[in-house]
């Protein structure tokens, strides 16, 4: 029987599990320190933990369950990792270098069912959720790689924007956040963690009530129901009015700024009229919202979409600014490798099966 990774336990869960086995909280503190501060690769390396406790841990848990399958490195320092899970599935994780630190983008599901018509992540339908351990281990694998390079670098920021819809795997995603921001371990500040959702309204409200104090980004991508439904099928079930109501609840509950993500598609949603419609849609929340304009990374299977011209991006940006909307253009990373989220995974699966990838 394959053991699950101990990385899936929050500190409180580890304390409770060890207590059931007859161990005190101090033992959990030792184990936690070895896992996240000293970053050992095996239980045997926990030299000040008693042998009976190590045997108990080894009987029920593994530490590592992910294996590196492929790694790509960009000229700008971006690294894209393709990890193989214990069941053979592949997931992507990306390390990005910024002036403010090292950021890792994690995946939360194997495949995606949201069905955004421009996205490489949804080329393969969701087969399962990742466990909290599998999400945490993505961070740990990247950190182990950094440790091995001997540069004393650490992951300082996390974006939950990889393959899958994080709010469709809500419980595991929340446990992941509790693990990585625990001050006794990785101690990644809540303000340095951002979760992105395609707009699951009910979960946005639940997220607001959870008081995790991390950042929220909404994948909006269109200012009207007609256009958003055309490029994001989720809008059929959760139209913009319902999404905006959930966003307003979140803002009132948390008083935290949100990011509205808007991918620019040539001659689809990048016109001046779209910018004006967007400004009208979000004008009443402009004090707590920032629009992040995203240049599109073309995907072979979505050839109907093209990257917006630089002049169109500038015009869209200028129109929003003139309407008093805070906005920015996302800095691109890894443009000389498989830049689109899910692109490396889909290529590897096609290569191994010899089949075309069909959107789910």
Image: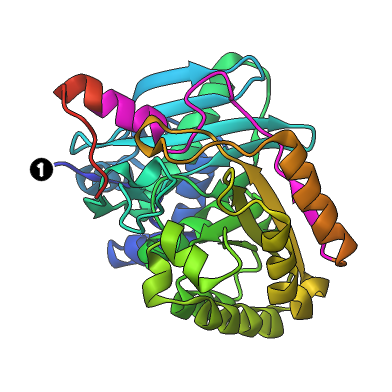
> Which residue carries the number 1 mark?
1
Colour scheme employed for the rendering of this structure: rainbow
Query: Which quarter of the picture shows residue 246?
Result: bottom right
| Residue 270 in view, yes or no | yes
Q: How many numbered discs, if any?
A: 1
Query: Which quarter of the picture shows residue 278?
Result: bottom right
Which quadrant: the N terminus? top left
Front residue of 205 and 16: 205
Provide residue 338's location: percent of width, then percent of height: 47, 25
| Left/right of residue 56 with respect to residue 343 in the rendered view | left
Front residue of 314 and 218: 314
Q: Is residue 315 magenta?
A: no
Q: Is residue 239 above or below residue 151?
A: below
Provide residue 260's location: percent of width, then percent of height: 65, 61
**What is the span of residues highlighted in magenta in the rendered image?**
325-349
| Residue 44 in view, yes or no | no
| Left/right of residue 172 with respect to residue 211 in the rendered view | left
Secondary structure predominantly adopted by residues drawn in magenta: loop
Residue at horizontal 53 percent and vertical 81 percent from the top = 205
Q: Is residue 235 above or below residue 117?
A: below
Residue at horizontal 45 percent and vertical 53 percent from the top = 27
Q: Which class describes the residues within 10 Å of circle 1: few (<14), some (14-19), or many (20+)?
A: few
Local secondary structure at mark 1: loop
Provide residue 87's location: percent of width, then percent of height: 18, 38
Provide residue 355's location: percent of width, then percent of height: 16, 27
């Amino acid at each position: 029987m394959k053991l699950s990774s101990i990385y899936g336990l929050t500190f409180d869960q580890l304390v409770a599990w060890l207590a059931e086995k007859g161990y005190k909280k101090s033992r959990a503190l030792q184990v936690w320190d070895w896992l996240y501060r000293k970053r050992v690769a095996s239980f045997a390396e926990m030299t000040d933990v008693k042998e009976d406790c190590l045997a108990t841990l080894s009987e029920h848990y593994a530490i590592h369950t992910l294996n590196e399958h492929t790694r790509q490195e960009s000229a700008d320092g971006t690294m894209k990792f393709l990890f193989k899970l214990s069941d053979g599935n592949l997931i992507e994780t990306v390390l990005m270098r910024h002036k403010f630190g090292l950021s890792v983008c994690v995946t939360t599901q194997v495949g995606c069912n949201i069905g955004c018509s421009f996205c490489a992540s949804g080329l393969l339908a969701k087969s399962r959720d990742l466990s909290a351990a599998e999400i945490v281990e993505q961070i740990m694998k990247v950190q182990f790689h950094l440790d091995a390079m001997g540069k004393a670098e650490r992951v300082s920021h996390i974006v939950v924007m990889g393959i899958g819809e994080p709010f469709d795997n809500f419980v595991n995603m929340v446990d992941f956040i509790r693990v990585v921001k625990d001050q006794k371990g990785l101690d990644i500040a809540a303000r340095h963690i951002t979760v992105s959702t395609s707009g699951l309204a009910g979960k946005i409200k639940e997220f607001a009530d959870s008081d995790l104090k991390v950042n929220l980004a909404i994948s909006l991508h269109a200012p009207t129901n007609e256009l958003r439904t055309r490029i994001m099928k989720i809008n059929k079930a959760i139209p913009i009015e319902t999404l905006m109501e959930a966003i307003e609840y979140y803002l009132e509950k948390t008083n935290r700024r949100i990011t509205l993500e808007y991918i620019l598609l040539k001659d689809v949603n990048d016109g001046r009229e779209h910018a004006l419609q967007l400004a009208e849609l979000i004008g009443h929340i402009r004090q707590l919202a920032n629009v992040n304009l995203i240049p599109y990374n073309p995907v072979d299977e979505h050839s109907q979409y093209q990257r917006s011209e630089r002049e169109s991006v500038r015009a869209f940006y200028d129109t929003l600014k003139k309407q008093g909307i805070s906005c920015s253009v996302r800095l691109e990373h890894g443009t000389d490798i498989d830049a689109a989220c899910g692109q490396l995974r889909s290529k590897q699966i096609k290569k191994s099966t010899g089949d075309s990838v069909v959107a789910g």
